[in-house]
Image (cartoon, coloured by chain):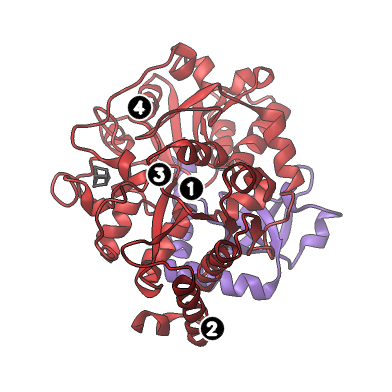
Amino acid sequence: MCLGIPGRIVAVTDEHRMMALAEVSGVRREVNVACILEGPIEDLLGEWALIHVGFAMARIDADEAAKTLQALQDLGEAQEAAEAMAEGAKALEGQG
Amino acid sequence: MKYATEFRDPKAARAVLARIAGLADQIGATKARPVHIMEICGGHTHAIFRYGLDKLVHEGIEFIHGPGCPVCVLPMSRVDECVEIARRPGVIFTTFGDAMRVPGTKMSLMQAKAAGADIRMVYSPLDALELARRNPERKVVFFGLGFETTTPSTALSIQQAAREGLENFSVFCNHITVPEPIRALLDDPHMVLDGFVGPGHVSMVIGIHPYDFIARDYGKPIVVAGFEPLDLLQSVLMVLIQIRDGRAEVENQYARVVPEHGNPVSLAAIDDVYEKRPSFEWRGLGEIDRSGLRIRAKYRAYDAEETFGIGYAAGPRVVAEPEGCACGQVMTGRIKPTGCAQFGSGCTPEMPLGALMVSSEGACAAYWQYGGARISEAVE
Ligand code: SF4
């Protein structure tokens, strides 16, 4: 539960609430980017970050992201994170 | 060394393993008199078993699996309180999936859900916030659980709820901290610990200095590590080098992600929202001073303990662990999971007695899944 998974910021969804769309292991979901914001939120587009329970916690470079993702896939953690995100979506619809 | 071929860079792994073996010989570590290295983080425990690192390293290195899995250290009383809140009228109780199967004294959250409580698995506290927005007539409670990696996300969610004036959102706060249980273990005269592999993602939030006391006051090396197998092996090597040189320092193997002073935004949010509890109960370890966080008075409206009059707000409650359960001894490294009389008989992933069997980061679950290392006797 305490592992972060690499995600790529692909769109800004709500600048005011510091929310952006991240692609995490093939799944897209809205994440909070407050912890990695250093300048304008648009600067994050295309950047990689470690995403943990819906929050971008640290910026990482693309090479680090690829290596970490591979390690997490080997551990089964990437799959688990994708499943947890799907569960989260279901919970909002009242089926979780 | 067949497992080493599974590594992305088997050559590098073999080289590090050879250096570890050389150093272990140099400092006189043997199977009978091993160097005890505790990995604090449950994610590291999981990786050690998955890659068979405990089998690959020199036999004079003994991994002690620390209390770094937040689900494993959750006391039964807190699970009972979750169930109690979830069963109150009008409540939607939200939790990470990891906590669903942890046994309480009467039932787990999974069983409470089957019995009709509205319990939903969320991926993020942000999902709980969204549920509160969409269901203004319901009370949405988020089960805040985890170490410093997870703590800022709950804090930022509470701040967001306060900004929006969301009145139907609250957090049942069970956030805990890494340094204090380590101090408790180091103060335990029965513990034999020679060095530590520090948690990477916790440190990404808090930096490396909260571990200074381990080196300064207890004279033990600690190396903050990443999660790839090679990261872990390198960190073990760095611990051994410190031992050989008679040094005790905090070193950062995972500097590509862990800033020395942590993440300032996360730390500010934690400081704004939480304060230390005088003490907090850990499953199998008992009450540990200043090891848990509670929500500050200024965010009281978002504190489920206050609004539901439950938990520490209702006075301390201690529930005995089930008979025969050795979770506490496993978490303090005194016995291996296979040393628990219940392992595989009274306690299996299907019918767990303790949380260490249900969490993916739990030592008992890892033993069950990947098989015990050198099935070794008690450390004592
Ligand atoms: S086998 Fe079960 S009861 Fe025994 S220590 Fe592990 S989780 Fe606890």
| Amino acid type of the residue that numbered disc 1 sits on in the rendered structure | Gly
Q: Residue under mark 2: which chain is it in?
A: B
Question: Between marks 4 and 3, how big is the CA–CA gap?
Answer: 35 Å
Label 4 element class:
helix
Front of the two marks 1 and 3: 3
- Residue found 43% across the figure and 49% down from its top: B66
Question: Between marks 3 and 2, how big is the CA–CA gap?
Answer: 33 Å
Q: Position of residue B248 (x, y in %)?
A: 62, 54
Structural crowding at the residue carrying mark 3, measured as other residues with C-alpha within 10 Å and reported as few (<14), some (14–19) or many (≥20): some
Front of the two marks 1 and 2: 2
- Would you say residue B6 is visible in this rendering? yes
Q: Residue under mark 4: which chain is it in?
A: B
| Amino acid type of the residue that numbered disc 4 sits on in the rendered structure | Val
Query: From the viewer's perspective, is A15 left or right of B219?
Result: right
Label 1 element class:
helix
Tag 1 and tag 3, C-beta contact below 8 Å: no
On residue B12, the disc is 2
- Residue found 48% across the figure and 44% down from its top: B122
Q: Position of residue B367 (x, y in %)?
A: 28, 59
Q: Nearer the viewer, residue A52 or B60?
A: B60
Question: Between marks 1 and 3, how big is the CA–CA gap?
Answer: 41 Å
Chain that is red in the image: B
Query: Which residue lies under the disc numbered 1?
Result: A88
The image shows residue B327, relative to residue B198, as above or below, that is above
On residue B83, the disc is 4
